[in-house]
Image (cartoon, grey):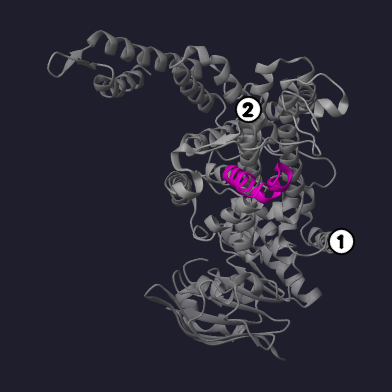
Amino acid sequence: MTALLSLRGVTAFYGAIQALKGVDLDVNEGEIVTLIGANGAGKSTLMMTICGNPRARDGQILYDGADISALPTHLIMRRAIAQSPEGRRIFPRMSVYENLLMGAHGRSAAEAEETMEQVFALFPRMKERATQRGGTLSGGEQQMLAIGRALMSRPRLLLLDEPSLGLAPLVVRQIFSAIRDLNRSTGLTVLLVEQNAFQALRLAHRGYVLVNGAITMAGTGPDLLARPEIRAAYLEGGH
Amino acid sequence: MLRDAFLSALVALGLFGAMIGLKTDVGATALTLTPRPLAVAVAVGLVFVGRLALLAWKKARPPHATGPGALARRMARIGHFVAPLLLAFAVALPLFAGRYWLDMGILVLTYVMLGWGLNIVVGLAGLLDLGYVAFYAVGAYAYALLSTQLGLGFWTCLPLAGILAAFWGMLLGFPVLRLRGDYLAIVTLAFGEIIRVVLLNWVSLTGGPNGISGIPRPTLFGLTFTAGGGEGSFADFFGIEPSVSHRVIFLYYVILGLALLTNWVSLRLRRLPLGRAWEALREDEVACRSLGINVTVTKLTAFAIGAAFGGFAGAFFATRQAFVSPESFTFIESAVVLAIVVLGGLGSQLGVALAALVMIGGSEVFRDLAEYRMLIFGAALVVMMVVRPRGLVSGRAPSVALGSRKRIAAEMVTEGRG
């Protein structure tokens, strides 16, 4: 398998504070890879750095063989990478339909309609709520909308930042199973950042553990789940 | 309730104690202070009673008697009738109205156009611009200078004025790309003042405080509107009695056309991806970036297009007045246009038109009341913010929809967040 996305020694700073301290990470085509870690470990920063905001100071971010670390954000996002950002960030005053259309920015209306049907098939709830305002949706529906909006650009690589944040366990399971279906049926590559380590590792093919801006462990999902240090740090005491 | 009213009265006492309570008179040798305790007592008492009445009214009124959706639906239904009626009235006005009312119509329409132009920047893109008058000034001076110095006609200068204003809009846009909300407002405010101060001090080009006079009037395909008629005039060509009112009617239709153009363009833009990107930008800039929207270009186009309409309106202003000076482009103009947009309901085209009618028309009608005009104006603003905090016509219809359009209730639209 070839790596669709690989990070080599990536560092990133917020002012003088170093948030990423040389991260190496690979995401192969067709894989679900999860990145777990505690609050403030740099998970979201890593996600944002891939998108070019903040920019990587050192190291390379290779996507499909090309270094994208110097590109402006909007050009990175046009290279078949899509992100469902942390905290969902849907457009609250726009309808569900308009929210989805925003995801297809820069693509033709016909293409957008076609992709929207696929999103509606994945999340039938979105079709029911199409004329409703984004802000009136429940948390779980907003997360579906955020993922659906990201899918509207027909990405090869989907970056998901904490899709389980603030959602009921049942809803989390629904969303994770939708991600699994999507990966199986279309071969979509997914990089998933999660605090909910247990669910994320069960879903993912492989996982990385980020501590203080550096990768400390890597392995397959079941392998990481079985390790005692992971159990102690991220799994015990509920999830 | 009593406690609240008492606190309001206390604040009023603090404010009015010095403002109303002390009157300065010119005495024999120096200024003398005359205390006016009775006036203060009256003012404070009014505040106390007013606050009490307001609270009582709020308590007595059942919360959302008709439900939030019902109100929005009713407003939408009324809107369907009001907009065409207003348009028909505006088109027919010169048929029956006299000179005074036509002049007022021109004034109101100028502000409607400015309101619609600013609505693109503030209402759609959510960029709070307190210096909109700068683009109005750029348009006005562009036409004034191009016509008096180079002898270009109004219809040649109109697009040039728009382009120049758009250029200045982009120039303002670049430094403020990273700013939002209050910070953006301060910089735009400063920008508006910079333009005015430059116009005031660049005497060799702009004539400074004396302004530029003798700006040519617009023509209709080369036909002039001179009062005396004569060769090549409108009256001569159509073989009718020359009259000053022809020019006024012509100017009225020019500004009506320009305003409708502004409306049409902003409605069209809202349905295009660019317009949707503006609205998305207003909602969440980070999300826009994550969707691959070029935030820089989106912001700059909003500034440029909004400014262009300000420029058109400015060129019209210059040709109507035949005279421009920096005095016409003070901060209060920006504030009035912004007030029109906010009162009308951010993003609502009909609301802006109604607000301009009420504010500009209203303040003209109340001209006889002199200094009490601003008092009424201020009181009206306060009442508006209490009764309809999201503007006259609040709520928005989705620009695109599956099946039937559904209005988004006013209650869901955020209040005046730049």
On screen, residue A22 versus residue B306, left or right, reads left
* B364 falls in the magenta region: no
Q: Nearer the viewer, residue B382 or A130?
A: B382
Where residue B322 sits in the image (x, y, percent)? 61, 34
Q: Nearer the viewer, residue B91 or B116?
A: B91
Please, which chain is the residue tagged with disc 2 on? B
Residue drawn where x is 71% and y is 15% of the image: B98
| Quadrant assignment, res B243 | top right
| Quadrant assignment, res B251 | top right
Q: Nearer the viewer, residue B284 or B141?
A: B141
Residue type at numbered disc 2: Leu
Outermost residue toward the top in this view: B38
Say the numbered circle drawn on residue B64.
none
Image: magenta residue range? B139-162
Instruction: Find disc 1 in the rendering and name its residue.
Output: A110
Outermost residue toward the left in this view: B29
Where residue B186 sits in the image (x, y, percent)? 43, 48
Q: Is residue A129 visible?
A: no
Above or below, comparing residue B356 to residue B181 in the picture: above
Instruction: Find disc 2 in the rendering and name its residue.
Output: B107
